[in-house]
Every structure is written in structure tokens, then in C-alpha cells.
Amino acid sequence: MKADLDYIARRFQFFNDKIFGGCLTVPPMRFSHSRRGIAACRVQRQGADADHCDVKELTFSDLYDLPPEVWDDIIVHEMIHYFIASFALHDTAPHGELFKGFMRSINAKFGMHISVRYKLSSDDKYVGRNKVHIIFVITATDGSTYVMSLPRKIDMIVALSHHLATDARFVRYEIFVTANTFFDNIPVCRKRLRMVPMAADALATNLADAIPMTLRDGKLVRKAL
Ligand SMILES: [Zn+2]
């Protein structure tokens, strides 16, 4: 999902209460178009005292399409910076011992996965570029059609294909690769498989320039025409 300021502000308040005991004031927050970093906590040094900083703002990039739990990790990461700067705490580096100590205890206590750097998976594409979707179009025995959006995980694609081919409730399935933005809002199945009902004519229109794919020797390949 793409985050917006309203969403970030709500999560900030949620984590402020849950993790930081409500001690943080809401800083200025804005979105940027940064491709270099997903988020940043910008501070201004106050005079000669290097430990005393004023937080200028928290910035988030609007170019990333990330799962909500990754956004949460990123928001709390910036909140740790903000907490350290707000109370003028001394750390050994921007991600020094103090930062890492907070990070580890929050991860352990709240089951989060905050890290110093974010490794983005291949599915987390820039929104600026069109995302490529792997779409399953499924026809049920009653004639209704469904779509499923799969991540680029061949094991999942093979397992789903096998399931659809052997389940008597479905008569047909087809696989397409498409960059049509129409499919941006179909949630990608990560842990749970979700079928989204969709009218066949809407599908036909939006799959007009999609590439039909097929499985061959355990690989997803372009279907021979
Ligand atoms: Zn950081």
C-alpha cells in the first residue's frame, strides 16, 4: 500500500501511546519523492552543543508501495530517532548503541522487525514505475470469475496452479503478466490466498495487452500462441 499523511499520523499516535508512553509531541511530517530513502528524521543542531537537536520534521517517500507492517517498522524506526533527538539523548552514532538498544527491545517486546536499513523485497516496487503483476484468472463451475494476484514466487504459483487444476469447484484458470495499473489495487497474496470476484468483461478490457503465461518444467513462461 501507498501511505499518506493521515495514515502516518494515525500510526504515529498509535505507537506513541503503545511504545513511547505518549511522551512524544507530534512533529511536522511531510511526504517527499525521495528514491534514496524511504524515510528520514531531520534534525537541526542547536549551536555548539552537538547533542542538543531540534527535530525539524519527519519525511516519508511517496514512491514506495509497501505492506502495512513494513510501514509500521519504518514509522517506529523514525520515532526512535525522534525520541532520542527530542530528549537530547547521547548516542554513539546515528544508529549507535542507544538506537540499537531501543530497536532490539521494541522488536522483542512488540514483535516488530525494525532494522537499521530496510531490505526491500522484489515485490516492493517504486510506485513511480508501473508495477508488474502476476494475475490468475479463475472461472468457477457456476460461471463466475475471480482474480488472484501472486508474488514472484514460483513455488506459490506452481502450488496454486496444481490446486486449481484439481479442485472440482473450478473449471479453468489462466495466468497473465501485466503492468496495467487496474491491478495495483488487487492485494498480492502473501501468506493467505485471496480470490477477488470480478466481472468477466472488466477483466477482458484490462487484460487486453497482458501476456498469457503458462507453467513449463516448473517455470513460468510465455504461452505459445
Ligand atoms: Zn535511521
Image (cartoon, rainbow, N blue to C red):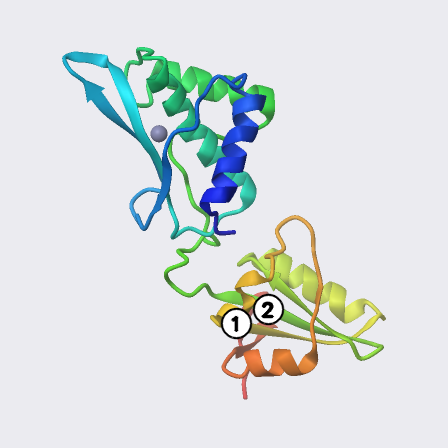
174 relative to 69, above or below:
below
Residue 130 appears anywhere in the view:
yes
Q: Which quadrant holds residue 28?
A: top left
Q: Which residue is mark 1?
A: 177
* Circle 1: residue type: Val
Does label 2 or label 1 sit earlier along the sequence?
A: 2
Task: Report x, y in % for residue 113.
Answer: 52, 31
11 lies left or right of 191: left
**What's the distance in space between the residues labelled 2 and 1, CA to CA?**
6 Å
Q: Which residue is mark 2?
A: 135
31 or 192: which is nearer to us? 31
161 or 31: which is nearer to us? 31
Residue lying at 38% horizontally and 34% vertically, measured from the top left = 117
Residue lying at 54% horizontally and 21% vertically, measured from the top left = 19
Residue lying at 63% horizontally and 55% vertically, measured from the top left = 189
Q: Which quadrant holds residue 223?
A: bottom right
Which corner quadrant holds the C terminus? bottom right
Residue farthest toward the bottom in the current orientation of the protein: 225
Task: Report x, y in % for residue 212.
Answer: 56, 79
Task: Report x, y in % for residue 209.
Answer: 49, 82
194 lies left or right of 81: right
36 relative to 75, above or below:
below
Q: Secondary structure at mark 2?
A: strand
